[in-house]
Amino acid sequence: MTGGQNSLKNFGAPAQGDRAMGAVDMDTCAKVKEDRPLLSVQGVMKLYGSRIGCTDVTFDLFPGEVLGIVGESGSGKSTLLGCLAGHLKPDAGRILYDGRDMGALGEPERRRLSRTEWAFVHQNARDGLRMGVSAGGNVGERLMAVGARNYAAIRDTATDWLGRVEIAADRIDDRPSAFSGGMQQRLQIARNLVTGPRLVFMDEPTGGLDVSVQARLLDLLRGLVRDLGLSVVIVTHDLAVVRLLADRLMVMKSGRVVEQGLTDQVLDDPQHGYTQLLVSSVLQV
Amino acid sequence: MIEITNLSKVFTLHNQGSAVIPVMAGAALSVTPGECVGLTGRSGSGKSTLMRMIYGNYLAAGGSIRVGDLDVARAAPREIIRLRREVLGYVSQFLRVVPRVPTLDVVAEPLLQLGVPVDAARARAADLLARLNIAERLWGLSPTTFSGGEQQRVNIARGFAHPYPALLLDEPTASLDAANREVVLGLIEEAKARGAAIVGIFHDEAARDRVCDRLVDVTGFTPRLAA
């Protein structure tokens, strides 16, 4: 693995050279230098009484990677996401974030992480926004929570982020209740990303949106992931969404991971009977 | 650059009586830098299957697929992702993109993934689109609404945006008129000249004869039907 990295880069340089290649190589070095998982999940289990929420979940997520988790409702994907994000306490297993054992971390430290290094995008934007506060306030509030105090600077940053998620600057003082569903979702994303997190959890971020709005949101998310080098765990039941967004895919059924691998490989050459059923059940448009 | 040995593939259909279908056995292929190898064999003989396995899109049942010094048959997903980003390009027959993304950005995306600055990536994309005769007024539109031939050319532009050391081409000249076919063959010849190792499927015999240095009939890799 470690040896492969350098040799791959050598192949990146074609025999006769190309003007663009110098730049490519330098940035590639920066992108692949971190070879340590940002999130390492080892044998995580969560029980609800005697019923299994999720069990025996193991995976590594590396910087800049997008992991999709699919499965029908009740498959344990939201429970797992809750455990990863620290909303639920696993009954067994370990979750290491950047090498630190989350189970051993105190509540204040966990809260600090969830404010600064993590973000959580809810399916329902209303769960992730403060509906009584202006759009600018929703974004600025997160900045203030991590210590920003200069009003003008906060407002500038908020305006910049609203622009990035394609919300017009003249809507900055409007409340999210006056926004469409797609705009609310984009505002939630701005609110979450303004503090520069490294790890983003998303629970059905495009669920409940019109297809046309979904497409725009997908493109926005792809651009942000690429430009900011975010690691993302995205839970969804929409296979088309994971195909376009996720590098890797994990399929869950009855609380267990039945299959995981490269997204297009899992979708085009599924090995497990359940995944085959899932893929073959998608209606063709 | 590409070295395949004793490769096999089996499909197990769990929901159709657990049918086990061996589709490939003992496949071998070697492609050196600057060489283009054409896969031949009748429809259904496994040309696309082999190509998808090289790309890591289909899992191998056994054997090895070395691209550079990564064995795709055993590599972790993230190693394959890096391979696809830097080393191995694939021009499929179908364009699959996020709807509503402008054509220019669709073509520039592989370069942006590599960290090339936006301006440089778009300039390269514009060069390729112009060369492939995609009218400039279309560059700002999503290719999802384009004709089949236009989509194919956008797909080719995207596949040639980064100078990959290895390339997989699935029917790159299908559904193209004579002028555009000539442009694509030119791109392939240039890729060979800079040292790219290429595996291609060409039903267009004249195109095949012109760019392929060698042909490999994949029918030889089809397992004998169990009597």
Image (tube, helix red, strand yellow):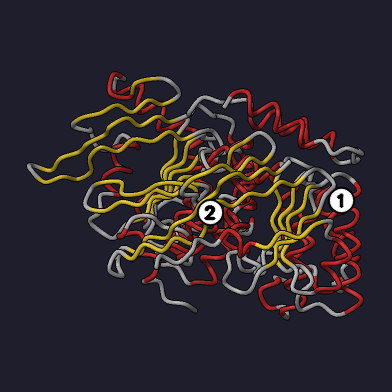
Q: Residue furthest left?
A: A50
Residue nearer the viewer, A37 or A133: A37
Describe the element under mark 2 as helix, strand or loop: helix
Q: Is residue B51 left or right of residue A207?
A: right
The answer to whether residue A31 of the structure is visible from this angle is yes
Which quadrant holds residue A58?
top left
- Residue B164's x, y, as percent? 77, 46
- Residue at 82% x, 67% y is B208
Give the residue at mark 2: A245
Q: CA distance from mark 1 to mark 2?
A: 32 Å
- In x, y percent, where is residue A259? 36, 49
Question: Residue A121: in sight, yes or no?
Answer: no
Q: Is residue A67 above or below residue A207?
A: above
Q: Residue furthest front?
A: B227
The total number of labels drawn is: 2
Chain label for disc 1: B
Q: Is residue B66 left or right of residue A57?
A: right
Which of the pair B38/A209 is nearer the observer? B38
> Label 1 sits on what residue type?
Lys
Residues at discs 1 and 2 in contact (Cβ within 8 Å): no
Task: Indicate the quadrant containing the N terminus of chain A: top left, top right, bottom left or bottom right.
Answer: top right
Label 1 packing within 10 angstroms: few (<14), some (14-19), many (20+)? many
- Residue at image x 86%, y 53%? B124
Callout 2, which amino acid? Leu
Q: Secondary structure at mark 1?
A: helix
* Label of residue B192 in the image: 1
Percent position (x, y) of residue B187?
Answer: 88, 59
Residue B156 figure quarter: bottom right
The image shows residue A282 at horizontal and vertical percentages of 40, 71
Q: Nearer the viewer, residue A248 or A204?
A: A248
